[in-house]
Amino acid sequence: MESRGVPPGPYRATKLWNEVTTSFRAGMPLRKHRQHFKKYGNCFTAGEAVDWLYDLLRNNSNFGPEVTRQQTIQLLRKFLKNHVIEDIKGRWGSENVDDNNQLFRFPATSPLKTPPRRHPELRRNNIENFSKDKDSIFKLRNLSRRTPKKHGLHLSQEKAEKIKHEIINEDQENATDNRELSQEDVEEVWKYVILIYLQTILGVPSLEEVINPKQVIPQYIMYNMANTSKHGVVILQNKSDDLPHWVLSAMKCLANWPRSNDMNNPTYVGFERDVFRTIADYFLDLPEPLLTFEYYELFVNILGLLQPHLERVAIDALQLCCLLLPPPNRRKLQLLMRMISRMSQNVDMPKLHDAMGTRSLMIHTFSRCVLCCAEEVDLDELLAGRLVSFLMDHHQEILQVPSYLQTAVEKHLDYLKKGHIENPGDGLFAPLPTYSYCKQISAQEFDEQKVSTSQAAIAELLENIIKNRSLPLKEKRKKLKQFQKEYPLIYQKRFPTTESEAALFGDKPTIKQPMLILRKPKFRSLRY
């Protein structure tokens, strides 16, 4: 069942909860069941509910195929706790649900949650206060009024070009007529420009419902833009805010496994599991998630852009949102995403969990320390898992510094300095990002593309095994044999003949001798 789409806005997690519960009640098959020599009608087993709900979540664009069966069981437990379901005796309120034959049914009461509403008078006062604050925030001092005020987020192309020509001519006449801008003025411009760009990328009429402008600290944005290493990672001046040395060493060890020589301690069986547990314990003990509590609504709303045809929009929106983070949080997020991304792609990484693969384990372990609400939200784990999965795949783009933002701010400051713009609200002269959207495709075409993409990823995994020079020859033969067993068609496409397979190991193909050799009998003449 496809998602019907939850529009951006406040309390999006609550709206998603209502969408999932409504779909579950409407679509879950009900039938008769027998238990303890007694028949019960219009009910279902826990196992049947897990199967149906698991399929629903994986095909919902808000959660995606990364959802695990264990996460589905956890959601079913929340359903029982919140009286979305009850057992056949009418009991609910606990989380006593397992993947078994226990019987449940739907109650007569509505399971929908009502988003909290502010009093209309309070809401009106908040809007008025916000408008006043915005005016005071964006008002710059001692600027000339040579340019009439323009309304809207940005000027039209024709008007912008006209003003630019006027500016060039006027600059030639008054080359020294510049005004000094204070540090406060510069910070206000940074704040204004990033919020305008974010609003434009998200395509919403206002950011008021998803972010409070007072929460945006321009000093964080400026620091994150200016203080980076050659790899784009934030460099902290105050080392007490950085990760402890032992955590950094442990992360470097697993990120570069098995080539890392940073840790000189001798390894043992299960060593990598202990190192991973040490890293996980540190991040899980942090006082708040890396994306902070105050930006929860902002990131949850961006989760609704996480669809194939909106991928570019989601990347650009997350790129700007991550610039709003405190520098220590941004640095921790960058290093964490680099580590778990490398670990997930490392074919040499030993198994870190008996039941889960490396990628699923990374998402399951670190999702709550990346995104979570200050108050418990029932879909927190699923939403956070979806976001962490996307960050893992696109962290290099999302966590890099956008050059267009620096250019826009510099140009805006230049116009302000020369007095051509009275305040930041007069208009942006730098071009805003534009997007071309892909056309909608049918479900069959999507399935075909999904299969081809999956096969390409598996073929890439085969190439990684083949080109891995650090892998011993015996181990490489073993992995290739296992790969051939699991994916025979892809293996045959890569090695169509025995000669091509033998060339990889430098062996000569063995030519089997016929099992039975018949010699032609020699006929001797009867004549002497």
Image (cartoon, helix red, strand yellow):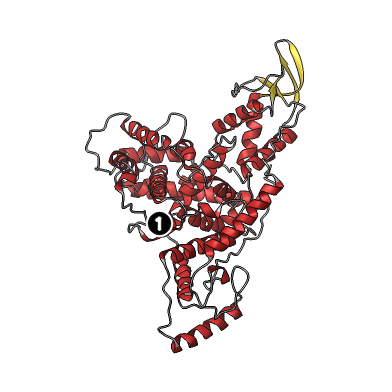
Q: Is residue 194 above or below residue 4?
A: below
Residue at x 75%, y 27% (from the top left corner)? 30
Quarter of image, res 245: top left
Quarter that holds the N terminus: top right
Give the number of callouts: 1
Between 190 and 439, which is closer to the camera in this rendering?
190
Between 518 and 382, which is closer to the camera in this rendering?
382
Task: Name, please, the residue furthest toward the front.
Answer: 142
Residue at x 44%, y 70% (from the top left corner)? 410
Between 295 and 274, which is closer to the camera in this rendering?
295
Residue 381 location, x and y as percent? 54, 37
Query: Which residue in the protein does label 1 denote?
Result: 224
Q: Is residue 363 visible?
A: no
Residue at x 47%, y 50% (from the top left corner)? 393
Q: Is residue 404 above or below residue 85?
A: below
SS at badge 1: helix
Q: Is residue 401 visible?
A: yes
Task: Name, please, the residue furthest toward the top.
Answer: 37
Give the amino acid at mark 1.
Asn
